[in-house]
Image: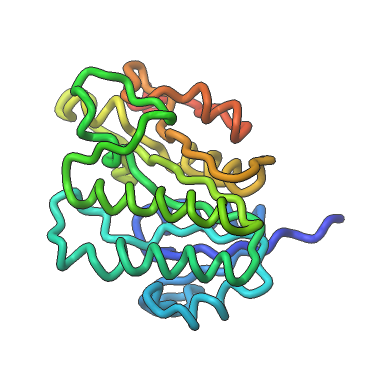
Amino acid sequence: MPQQRGVVLTGAAGLIGRSVSQELADAWRLRLTDKVLEGPIETLDVTDLDACRKAFAGADAVVHLAAVPDPEATWEQLLPANVVGAYTVARAAMDAGVRRLVLASSLQAVAGLPEHAQRRATDQARPANLYGATKAWAEALGSWVAATSRTSVVALRLGYFPGRRLDVATTPVSELSAWLSARDAVGFLRGAVEAEVEGFLVANVTSANRHRVADLHGTEEALGYQPVGGAWTLD
């Protein structure tokens, strides 16, 4: 039986991290980290470069989810984790020589595009808030890492992840069209780590919603995963 790949997950105590860690642990030798010590989660300050280098040493991949996820967050709130932390994790992953770095970007990175335009993974970043700007920064860091090292990078422009089923009757269409289920988050994260990707890739990530704010064709092909169900069917 082949040895499981070692993967470090940052932000394991966050909404997405809590929702995907168990299933990912079944597939990988998963090391859970966050700024707080909780159960199997190890403490890791993503703004501490030396600590990140030590945590990533010997890992096959790093999945970086740690961030302030609020589109209305202030610069002061975003600076530590989303700006400094994104750089620190990228630098440490490159220094540790990991094969793959997966960065949690967001569709907020392209929220400044025309309202009714479907987002494509090839669209240049056009944020409409500071949070989206920090995700554009993360994508730029990923491109830098891939261009200057042997570490390949996948930046996932994640959709709306409430961590629960939605009330279709009361939820805005904009949220329904960007909805991402936990099951599909797991599938896309596995693809982002395991797929044969060279250099740098930006990928849109939502469930198979009836009206899709983001085009997924490139993502499905590159990562080898097709989402199952969507917000309207609640699968």
Q: Position of residue 14 (x, y in %)?
A: 35, 61
Residue 105 pos. (x, y %): 38, 47
Task: Provide residue 90's location: percent of width, then percent of height.
Answer: 48, 63
Figure label count: 0
Q: Would residue 69 be seen by someone viewing this image from the given angle?
A: yes
Up/down of 28 relative to 45, above or below? above
Residue 176 location in percent, x, y? Answer: 27, 27
Residue at the image point whose x is 61% and y is 62% from the top: 7
Taking the spot 43% from the left edge, 55% from the top edge, the residue there is: 141
Identity of the residue drawn at 32% across and 20% down: 118
Q: Nearer the viewer, residue 1 or 108?
A: 108
Q: Name which quarter of the figure residue 123 lies in.
A: top left
Kindly give the residue lying farthest to the front in the view shown.
148
Residue 23: tell me if it is visible.
no
Between 90 and 22, the one lying in front of the other is 90
Q: On screen, 196 above or below 230? A: below
Q: The N terminus lies in which quarter of the figure?
A: bottom right
Residue under the image location 30 percent in, 63 percent down: 83
Query: Residue 229 lies in what quarter of the image?
Result: top left
Whether residue 173 sits left or right of residue 155 in the image: it is left
Residue 113 sits above or below residue 97 on the image: above
Above or below, 222 relative to 198: above
Quarter of the figure with the C terminus: top left
Residue in the foreground of this view, choosing between 130 and 175: 130
Q: How is the image coloured?
A: rainbow
